[in-house]
Image: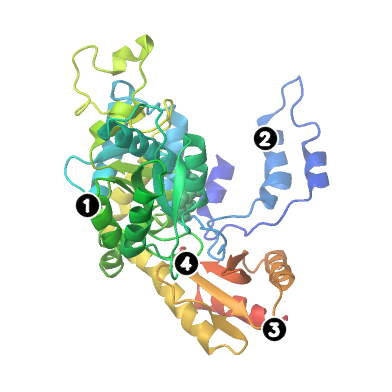
Amino acid sequence: MDHLLHRLRLDQPPLGRLGDPQELTLALKDAIGSAPQPPADVLRTYTDALEPTVVSCDHPAFLAFIPGAPTKAAALFDMVLSASSLHGVSWLEASGAVAAENQVLRLFADLAGLPASAGGCFVSGGSAGNLSALVVARDTGRHRRGLSPHAPVRIAVSDQVHSSVGNTLRILGVEPLVVPTADHRLTGDALRVALDAAERDGGAPVVAAVATAGTTNAGIIDDLEGVAEQTRARDLWLHIDAAYGGAALFVPELRERLRGIEHADSLVVDPHKWMFAPFDCGALLYRDPKLARAVHTQDASYLDAIHGADGADDETEWNPSDYAYHLTRRPRGLPLWFSLAVHGTDAYRDAVAKGADIARRTARLVEETEGLELLREPELTVVLVRRTGWQPEDYYAWSKRLLAAGTAFVTPSVWEGETVARLAFLHPGITEETVRAILGSLVDEG
Ligand SMILES: *Cc1c(COP(=O)(O)O)cnc(C)c1O
């Protein structure tokens, strides 16, 4: 309890550092033996040897990948969850928890402009959401075309789609129809050309398209309206991966850029990214949840009790297990529910807007700094920067120096074949001073 309170009371967690494999092996050598040990001793192994080697994603200067920065309220409530052994599989076992999770899903559906019928569940994240949604897209597509349950089909994706979608299609045995993008953005026109060509190429029918609302590498939002026009005209399932960018729905100025998101047949948003929920928390919504139930509901005699054997209605007695490939799950939407209720949605709007604002201000600082080049105006919160004259190894050495110095955690990425610096903002607590220090380190230490 002391450790929990200490951790929760920190204004800012330590940034952390990279662990040494030999030191860690040594620290863990006798950790698990046949005899019991005092919990305080085991905890000390964690606090002294393990925890320092975990980089805190919620440090304001964690600007790598996509950070996460849970509110204290959400982190606290996560402990309530852990202390309660809540089993979020079904209405029968956890109706109150499911009702609260559904309240959050309803809020997202309303922000996105999805119909009153929309619904889904919380999953571990964008990858699990993409997989669960695209199974439904595939099977619904086959069914609507009168194809056999194993008939080959294709799903259209852009060449910028998240790696988890590529993985998903491999798992599903679905061939991607890769649509090339000009300027990294999937457009309705590009999709139309690719779909027209696919009709003539003798390949399997295309049953769905995936659009991204905020690419992970650069925060680019696809032409959702143009893409939706194509999918609607051709009766294709539209899946929108808004794992990172979905939080922009809270901010009216940013919401504008997501126009077309209301046409999604399935939508993924990761609250553990830019919505300040603890890991792991992904929201998955379907326009018509019936279609998801038809695919995901598991049929077994021991599950009859949760599936209306007593005459219960699956529409009102909602089972999260019917909307993704999982069964047992923690109701991981609850920490977000608690935090949303405690802070109110205006606070979320302001906190999300702050991330976009610091990204824009960073872009201006980059432009003003001799030796730095802004590679693209940030649409959301990712800023890509070239340090004139640097080779890939310079960026990696710089990244290591910054972490070792405890200044920031920033990892390089590749943009148009070139290694560059990438700053992914999100934490509303990052200061311009820290940003200046990071940019300064790019030009000073070369
Ligand atoms: C992060 C991300 C994912 C994967 O989400 P996880 O929660 O890490 O599984 C998928 N798509 C996009 C666009 C993302 O940014």
Residue at point 48% right, 66% down?
218
Q: Position of residue 179 (x, y in %)?
A: 43, 57
- Mark toward the viewer: 1 or 4: 1
Q: Which corner quadrant holds the N terminus?
A: top right
- What residue is shown with label 4? 429
- Mark toward the viewer: 4 or 3: 3
Q: Which corner quadrant holds the C terminus?
A: bottom right
Alpha-carbon distance for marks 1 and 4? 45 Å
- What residue is shown with label 3? 444
- Mark toward the viewer: 1 or 3: 1
- What residue is shown with label 2? 40
Q: Are marks 4 and 2 in contact (CB under 8 Å)?
A: no
10 Å crowding of disc 3: few (<14), some (14-19), many (20+): few
Q: Position of residue 223 (x, y in %)?
A: 32, 63
First in sequence: mark 4 vs mark 3 = 4
Which residue type does callout 2 highlight?
Ala
Left or right of residue 233: residue 399: right
Q: Callout 4: helix, strand or loop?
A: loop
- What residue is shown with label 1? 233
Alpha-carbon distance for marks 4 and 3? 25 Å
Colour scheme shown: rainbow
Q: Position of residue 121 (x, y in %)?
A: 33, 37
First in sequence: mark 2 vs mark 1 = 2
Which residue type does callout 1 highlight?
Ala
Left or right of residue 3: residue 177: left
Q: Is residue 410 visible to the viewer in this orientation of the structure?
A: no
Q: Are marks 2 and 1 in contact (CB under 8 Å)?
A: no
- Mark toward the viewer: 2 or 3: 3
Which residue type does callout 4 highlight?
Gly
10 Å crowding of disc 2: few (<14), some (14-19), many (20+): few
First in sequence: mark 2 vs mark 3 = 2
Alpha-carbon distance for marks 1 and 3? 54 Å
